[in-house]
Amino acid sequence: MADRRAYTGVRIVETGSFAELGDLAPSETKRFRIKVPYKQLGITGAEGVYPVGVQVLATDMDGSRSPAALGGATTLLPLISSDREAVPTSVLWPFLMPDTKTVDGTYARPDRLLRSVSPGGQLRNLLDLASSSPGEGGTALVDPALLVGVDDLANGRHLPEELELTEQQRAPAAAFLADLLTYARTHTAWVLGYDRPDVLALAENPDLREPLQRAIDRATDTVLAKYQLSGRRVSWPTRDGVTSGLLSSQRGTGDSPVIVTSAALPDWEPRLGSLVRYTSSRGPLPLLVNDVKDTDADGPETVVGLRQRVLSDAALAVLERAIDPESRADSFTLVDPQWNPGARWSTGRLDAAFTVPFTRGASLDSLLTRRLASYDGKVPSSAKARPLSRTQLLRATEIVKQGATLSSVISQSESVDDTLAREVASVLAVRWRLDRPGGLALAASYAQRIGAELDKISIEAPPRSRSPAPRAASRSRSATTPTRRSGSGSTSTPATRLSRSPPWTPSTWRPGNGGPSRCRSTSAVSGRRSSPHTS
C-alpha cells in the first residue's frame, strides 16, 4: 500500500466499503480486509480485464482529512464468460546466485545466502511457491553458480574464519539444494551460463570472446554433470543491453533462446507470441519476450498480484485470438529474481491461475516445439547499458592463459581446469557492473595466485656433456634414462624434471592450497609434451 500514485477508476464511497484501522504510529502496520459488493465495482459484464484499486485515507491529529490518498494498490479482475479455447500459460522462475567470492577466496556474504535459503528466506519462499504450481506451467531458470554456492555453504567450504556454523545451522542449505534440484529435474529446466556472464561485454569484444566463452561453457557443463542436471542453455542480457550484434553472437546452434524485453523489440506485438524467431546475421534463433508492464516493472508485490497478472494476460490473449485467428498470443510471466513472496505465500493461491477454463499450463520447452512466428522488426544497434570494461575481459583472458600453462605441467589437471573455468566465469559475471573496482580486484587476485603457483615450479636437468653424444649412442641409452628431442636441434638430452620448493604434497591441487602432487615433464624449448614423469 506504499504507492500513492495507484489511483484506479472512480472511488467507491458507499457505506460499508471502508475498513477503519484506528490510530497508526509512524512505521506501524495493520492488516485489514474490505468486502465490496460485486455490483458496486461497476463491472459491466463485458469480457476483458477490470482494474480495481484500494486506497488509504488518513485523518490528521486536528481532525482534518485530505482527499488525496496516502497509499494505494491495484489488482486486476479478468472476466471471460464465454467458452473460449485455453491459451498456453507459463511462468519462468529464476534462481540466481546472490553472493560472490572475495579476493581471499571466501564468500562475501554467506550469512545472507544462508538466510535466503532457510525457511522464510527469499530464495526458499520463491522455490516453495514455484513448487506449489502445476508442473506443466512452470520452468526453472537455474544459475549453476547457485548450486555450487549453496553446496559449499552446506558443507562449510570457503567460509570466512569469523563465520562458524554447526552442521545443524548448515542443514537448511542442504535441504534447499536438494529441493531445487528436485524441482528442476521434475520440471522443465533452462540453464544460464555460470554466474550469469555479461554477454554484452563478450559480444563487444569479439577478439577475446572465444576462449572466455569456452571457459564459461566448461564451468557450466561440469557443474550440471556434477549435480546430474540437464537443461536448455539460455542467455539473459540486461534490460538495456540487447543489440543486433549481441543476438548474432548468441546464435550458436540456433536452439538456445535469448531472454529479451519487449522494449528491445520495438515492433513486437503480443499477437506474435512470447517466443518468436529472429534471424540474426549468423542465422535464426528464438527470442523469449518479457513484456514488462509499467504497473509491475519492479515485480509483483504479492502472490495475489502475480496470480492476477497471469490470469489477466491469459484473458487478453484469449480475446486477442478471438479477434485474430492467426494470433499466437499467450500468457508468459518472468518472475523478478529478487522478489520475496513472503512466508504466507500459500494464501495467494497461485495454483488457481492454472485451473480456470481459459488457461493451459505449458512449459517453455513445449512452446519451442511449435512453429514460431518471425520477428522481422528492428533491434537496437547499440546498447544503453554499459558492459564490463575491456580491461576486465583482458584480466580474465590472462587467467585463461596462465591456467593453460599450469594445467600443462601437472597431472590429473581436470579438477584444476574446472576450478579455473569457474573463476573465469565469475570474473565475467554481470553483477560486476555495479562494482567495477571489485570485479577488477577479483580478477587480479586470481591471476596473481596462478602466477605464484607457476613461480614455484622450477626446471631441473642433469648437466649436459661438453661433447654431444652421437645419435646412435643416444639411441642406446639405458631405458631408465628417458630422453627428449629438442625442437631446435636433432640431439637427444636427458629429460628435464619439474620440481618446486617446498616439495609438493600428495594432495590434489586447488588454487590457493598448495602445489600439485605430480607434474608432466614438458620441454621448455619446443613446448612438446613428453611421457609423464614423476618428480
Image: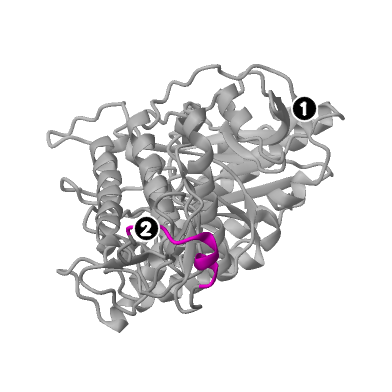
Q: Quadrant of residue 269?
A: top right
Q: Residue at x 47, y 45 (%)?
A: 488
The image shows residue 298 at horizontal and vertical percentages of 42, 38
- Magenta stretch, residue numbers: 466-476
The answer to whether any part of residue 2 appears in the image is: no
What residue is pinned by disc 1?
374
The answer to if 44 sits in the magenta stretch is: no
406 relative position to 64: left or right: right
- Circle nearer the N terminus (1, 2): 1
Tell me if residue 345 comes above or below residue 383 in the rendering. Answer: below
Mark 1 crowd level (few <14, some 14–19, many ≥20, 10 Å Cα): some
Give the total number of marks visible in the rendering: 2
Q: Nearer the viewer, mark 1 or mark 2?
A: 2
Q: Residue at x 44, y 61 (%)?
A: 469
Q: What type is the residue that disc 1 sits on?
A: Ser
The answer to whether any part of residue 278 appears in the image is: yes
Helix, strand or loop for disc 2:
loop
The answer to if 468 sits in the magenta stretch is: yes
Helix, strand or loop for disc 1:
strand
Q: Residue at x 30, y 56 (%)?
A: 454
In three-dimensional space, the C-alpha distance between marks 1 and 2, rounded to whole angstroms, equals 75 Å
Q: Which mark is residue 116?
A: none
What residue is pinned by disc 2?
467
Q: Residue at x 61, y 45 (%)?
A: 310
Q: Check if mark 1's residue and mark 2's residue have beta carbons within 8 Å.
A: no
Front position in the image: 161 or 124: 161
153 relative position to 520: left or right: left
Q: What type is the residue that disc 2 sits on?
A: Ser
The image shows residue 1 at horizontal and vertical percentages of 35, 41
Front position in the image: 432 or 333: 432
Q: Residue furthest right?
A: 325
